[in-house]
Amino acid sequence: MKKNFLSGCKALLLAATLSLGLTFPGWAASIQGEVTDVNSSTISGWAWNKEDTNDVQKVEVHICRADDPNPVKYLHVVADDYREDLVSKIKDGWHGFSVSVDWSQLKGTDFKIKAYAVKGDKYYTLGNSISYSKSTGASKKNSSSSASSTVSMVEPVTQSTAPKNAVQAASFSGNEKSLGIFTISGYCNCSSCSSGFGLTYSGTVPKANHTIAADLTLLPIGTRLRIGNTIYTVEDTGSSIVGNKLDVYYDDHATAENHGIQQMEVFLIQ
């Protein structure tokens, strides 16, 4: 059924918690950045390595409810956008980032946003958190004793010891196993995305929040996968879906396009 697959790259890594008494790599102190704006559709900021301006930063944004430190949403972006204000601020404009967020998908009204630069298995906090109210559309920076662009290091938590959060609390029966990071896009049943027959490769009618296309040599028909809070079933495939690539089915083309390209951790439901 599938015939098109988008390509691109954003990073996903596991959630992080603060760790004390750590030794910083030599370049850690040179990483700077912060979240500068949160509004009804985007979260923006900047991140750079002042000692190596060619070192493009991968940024992970955590969205938490105001009363819960466990993230309910992870967003991933590369800090390589041009921002005019950075020219005067850090003398190099090519270190901005902006990532879309659909607040309507998140339960609750008041949120706290944190951003991290990710280096291998280490996370480095980018400045202070920002509070955002979905009801008023207002945001404000949270005060801290440190400067807004100060970076501190946090260690990622393994799945076995991580605090139970919204992602890990997805409802399913059975055990799960991490399959690693996959490149994931969206598709629908239109002629641009699919063959247009209306059925998946397995002969089923595709359903949103259920159907996913995969490389069947790795993930056979019927395989159940968890991505974020959603459990999918492999029912489809495509000629360009090879290796660690997945395509999530949506009911309409606009929603499929809005999914964009994401790199996310995928869990096998056993």
Image: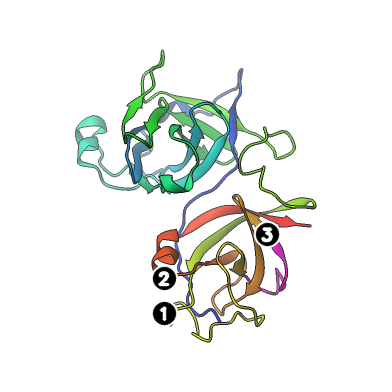
Q: Indicate which disc residue 253 carries.
A: 2
Identify which amino acid the numbered label 1 is placed on. Answer: Ser
Report the number of numbered marks.
Answer: 3
The amino acid at mark 3 is: Leu
Residue 192 is tagged as 1
How many residues crowd mark 1 within 10 Å: few (<14), some (14–19), many (20+)? Answer: few
Determine contact: label 1, label 2, CB under 8 Å.
yes
For the question of whether residue 128 can be seen, the reply is yes
Q: In which quarter of the image is residue 71?
A: top right
Secondary structure under the numbered disc 1 in the rendered image:
loop
The magenta stretch is 213-225
**Residue located beneath label 3 in the image:** 225
Q: Specify the farthest residue to the top.
A: 145
Task: Measuring from the top left, give residue 230's x and y in whole percent.
Answer: 61, 55
Residue occupying image coordinates x 51% and y 34%: 64
Tell me where residue 257 sits by quadrant. Answer: bottom left
Which residue is nearer to you in this view: 170 or 52? 170
Residue 119 or 261: which is nearer the viewer?
Answer: 261
What's under tag 2, amino acid-wise? His
Q: What element carries label 2?
A: helix
The answer to whether 198 appears left or right of 267 in the picture is left
Question: Of callouts 2 and 3, which one flags the residue occurring earlier in the amino acid sequence?
Answer: 3
Q: Nearer the viewer, residue 249 or 107?
A: 107
Secondary structure type for disc 3:
strand
Q: Vertical placement of 3 versus 35: above or below?
A: below
Q: Distance between the residues labelled 3 and 1?
A: 26 Å
Q: Where is residue 77 in the image (x, y as percent from the top left)?
A: 43, 47
